[in-house]
Image (spheres, rainbow, N blue to C red):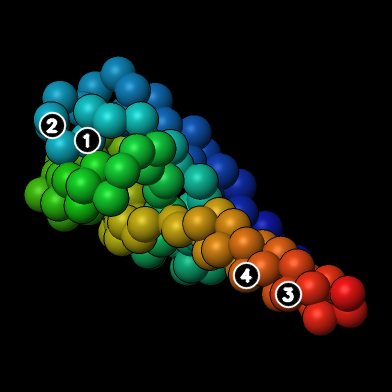
Amino acid sequence: MHYRHLRVAELIREALSVILMEEIRDPDLQGFITISEVEVTPDLRRAHVYYRVHGEEEDWKRAEKGFRRAHKYIRHLLGEHLFLRYIPEIDFHPDRRPEAAEALEALLARTRHGDDKEDS
């Protein structure tokens, strides 16, 4: 089996983390943003980049706008960091999975507490 796309995904994740911290000057991308995951298609032509914003809802909106505006420049910078024959097209996606997990946990906790009250 070929796992090259998994290795390339990890290289992209690491490079994007450095690029965001050290090279991007866009004010909408200046908050505390982390690259949580990168999925690269097996043909290495497209990368889905999932990011987390550590802040308020307004910070998420600003980051989304910043990634939309700067994605071509970020891809260019990625080409300077990685020595690949082809730099994949990049799609940025907000990663809200932890919030969804927290919301589910809160719902389950409320349900459990509701069950406890009925037993009394």
Quadrant that contains the N terminus = bottom right
In front: label 2 or label 4:
4
Measure the alpha-carbon separation of dots 1 and 3: 42 Å
Distance CA(mark 4)–CA(mark 1)? 32 Å
Q: Nearer the viewer, residue 66 or 74?
A: 66
Q: Earlier in the sequence, mark 4 or mark 1?
A: 1
Question: Alpha-carbon distance for marks 2 and 3?
Answer: 47 Å
Name above or below for residue 9 compared with residue 79: below
Whichever of labels 3 and 4 marks the residue nearer the N terminus, that label is: 4
Residue 41 in the image, given as x and y percentages of width and height: 48, 67
Q: Is residue 112 above or below residue 39?
A: below
Query: Dot 4: few (<14), some (14–19), or many (≥20) neighbours within 10 Å?
Result: few
Mark 2 surroundings: few (<14), some (14-19) or many (≥20) residues within 10 A: some
Which one is closest to the eye, mark 1 or mark 3? 3
Near-viewer residue (82 or 14)? 14
* Quadrant hosting residue 44: bottom left
Q: Residue at x 40, y 37 (%)?
A: 54
Q: Which residue is mark 4?
A: 107
Mark 3 sits on what residue?
114
Residue 26 tag number: 2
Contact flag, marks 1 and 2 (Cβ < 8 Å):
yes
Foreground mark, 4 or 1, reads 4
Q: Rounded to the nearest whole Å, what is the CA distance between mark 3 and mark 4? A: 10 Å
